Image (cartoon, coloured by chain):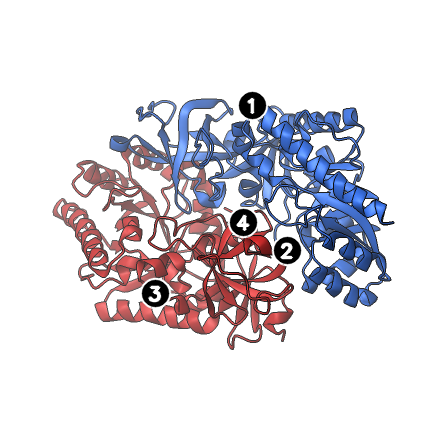
Chain colours: A blue, B red
């Protein structure tokens, strides 16, 4: 078993103890609310990781058909592909229907409903179709009040091989909610809008089996989830600095970090150069609009303790530049050439995506396992 | 042979005709200057692509040891690893020395020279070591005037199994040079500083076999490269919007694009939703500091013609949002649900990194080949 300080850098570390604690936290929230949890596996895209936060082949959410495929092959039977379907993906969706009994796609327009309806004859199994509801003006979806909602559902329901599954929403605007009160309000809005859509549909003879909502901030908000059939969230498995910046987690909850080596210094500038550039950390600067801009990540010592004030201020492809927020010089012992550090990720989904596998630790000293990640589409 | 419109989206397209033209352009510049070219393979990290811009197993530059390994196995014998070496990589470097006769690493401090010197006995072959020169206060390197320069070189030269190869520099500050004159000046500065370092070393009995400099903007600048033994550049193979924004290439030179499908609309907002989010385009916003901010990429029709004013304004993991710079509504024919578009990359190195393979076209209609990419470290 390798010690962490024997790993090649840069490496993506997962602290399994924290991953389990984060998984338990959200599972308990859902259990207390009496609402099923459908974890989003897009952050880590790993069967081994999902065994912790989506155990017992529970229903899952995916962001690509490549993920759907690998999870279906691992036995997951109830999969929601939560990105608006494009027509060219139908053959792949059909192949998935052989593997996952309950495979649900999402659309949000009559154009999509018509396309799908026209091509449904080529499906060899019944495809579940949900309608995305726009609850926060953030991204995709039809408004709950949009008359098209009924037309889309009817078109699906009237087509052989298609089954109208219900409605789903994701309040992405919750990533702009910097206090508990605004997150509670956003969670309430998310629930209310998706429930309103479901009620409108039911009132017109189109009952929703699936009434699905969620994002990490709204699932963890103190709002009623009553009436929803399920909650969805993803990044809570590892959390990250964006979530910490919102107040949804503490730095010490973050289960993913990038292990890196110090490769040089520019002493006059107070710079420490590391071998984790944007290729390892990603280009995500998701905290740049938050009160504390963490640049490309916060710096920890090799054991994962945050080094106060130190952050990754710049990145090139394989170079990262660390500096202190107040321009303090780098302690030559802590930041000696060859020393290892850990970088907490700004956005775990983006950082994890830069790796093909994760190095797993249970004791913060040794690497107990390596987990494969699926990339691509 | 698949037609491009039969490909799954998102897909990373390479226009081989443009790739060849870009490769020829830089090869001609170097030939005219009488300076060898050592292409950087970090943009595409593909043996098949390198056959075009680094043919005949010519000397290459790499950004990771994983690249070095795959290129060495393909027969490339003269490889420069252009990122400051960390001590934990020495065993991998040693393994590479069995495959690539002339393998060169880069250091820029006495700490690194001492470490390397102390561990050189474990090398089974002679390792070439170059010193990085900081020519523009941009990133790593020692200044040409720094007395440490001689100490580092002497320490290397006095160590068995190490050979002092020379000096190398990369004027990354050239990415901030928005007119030909400032690029010419930066190219001159890059050359002068690295030549000054080489002269200082030679004057002290430490001649440089390698006097290496370059970046795409400085290699293509109208400055003398006299005295350099080689020029390095990478992104010129495909170019991108950052390079176009500097005036180093035209949009029509960009050989890489992301093929994407339209998955929906938010008509009230003038938004067109596509299935290329940051997972396909990367989070790189490298044009945000340029006169024209291209967001996450410029939008072309399916044939690659730029749709004037349309750009990717927002991205989530698998969703991209396209809008018009002046708020024009989306033409329902051009932007119909299911239609394909192409997105020109802001930063080709970052966009290409999001894919495991490229779909290659020679005629802009059909896909002639698929090229593998190596990711990881």
Q: Which residue is mark 3?
A: B249
- SS of the residue under disc 4: strand
Q: Nearer the viewer, mark 1 or mark 4?
A: 4
Query: With respect to residue A201, does B29 lie above or below?
Result: below
| Whether labels 2 and 4 share one chain | no
Tell me the crowding category of disc 3: few under 14, some 14 to 19, or many 20 or more residues within 10 angstroms, Cα based: some
Q: Chain of mark 2?
A: A
Residue located at (66% from left, 27% from top): A221
Whether residue A1 is visible, yes or no, is no
Give whichever of discs 3 and 4 has the lower sequence position.
Answer: 3
Front: mark 2 or 4:
4
* Residue mark closest to the camera, 3 vs 1: 3
Q: CA distance from mark 1 to mark 2?
A: 33 Å
User: Which one is nearer the viewer's eye here, A273 or A163?
Assistant: A163
Are discs 3 and 1 both within one chain?
no
The numbered disc on residue B315 is 4
Q: What's the chain of the residue with tag 4?
A: B
Is mark 3 in CB contact (under 8 Å) with mark 1?
no
Q: Position of residue A161 (x, y in %)?
A: 85, 60
Query: For the residues marked 2 and 4, what is the alpha-carbon distance in whole angstroms?
Result: 17 Å
Q: Where residue A252 is drawn, which disc sits there?
A: 1
């Amino acid at each position: 078993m390798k010690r962490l300080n024997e790993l090649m850098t840069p490496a993506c570390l997962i602290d399994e103890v924290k991953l389990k604690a984060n998984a338990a936290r959200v599972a308990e929230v859902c259990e207390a609310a009496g609402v099923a949890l459908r974890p989003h596996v897009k952050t880590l895209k790993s069967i081994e990781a999902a065994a912790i936060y989506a155990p017992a082949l529970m229903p899952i959410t995916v962001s690509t058909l490549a993920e759907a495929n690998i999870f279906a092959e691992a036995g997951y039977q109830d999969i929601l592909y939560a990105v608006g379907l494009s027509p060219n993906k139908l053959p792949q969706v059909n192949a998935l229907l052989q593997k996952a009994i309950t495979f649900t796609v999402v659309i949000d327009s009559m154009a999509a409903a018509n396309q799908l309806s026209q091509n449904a004859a080529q499906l060899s199994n019944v495809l579940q179709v949900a309608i995305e509801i726009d609850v926060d003006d953030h991204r995709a979806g039809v408004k709950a009040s949009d008359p098209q909602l009924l037309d889309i559902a009817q078109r699906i329901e009237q087509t052989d091989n298609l089954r109208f599954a219900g409605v789903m929403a994701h309040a992405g605007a919750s990533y702009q909610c910097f206090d508990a009160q605004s997150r509670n309000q956003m969670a309430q809005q998310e629930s209310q809008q998706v429930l309103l859509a479901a009620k409108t549909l039911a009132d017109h003879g189109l009952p929703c089996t699936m009434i699905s909502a969620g994002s990490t901030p709204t699932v963890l908000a103190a709002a009623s989830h009553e009436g929803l059939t399920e909650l969805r969230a993803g990044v809570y498995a590892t959390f990250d600095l964006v979530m910490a910046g919102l107040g949804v987690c503490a730095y010490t909850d973050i289960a993913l970090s990038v292990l890196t080596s110090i490769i040089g210094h520019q002493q006059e500038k107070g710079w420490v150069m590391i071998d984790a550039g944007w290729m390892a950390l990603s280009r995500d600067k998701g905290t740049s609009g938050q009160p504390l801009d963490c640049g490309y990540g916060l710096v920890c010592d090799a054991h994962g303790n945050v080094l106060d004030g130190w952050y990754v201020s710049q990145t090139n492809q394989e170079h990262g530049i660390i500096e202190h927020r107040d321009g303090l010089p780098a302690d030559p012992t802590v930041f000696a050439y060859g020393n290892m550090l850990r970088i907490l990720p700004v956005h775990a989904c983006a950082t994890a995506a830069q790796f093909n596998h994760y190095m797993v630790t249970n004791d913060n000293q040794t690497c107990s396992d390596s987990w494969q990640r699926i990339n691509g589409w």
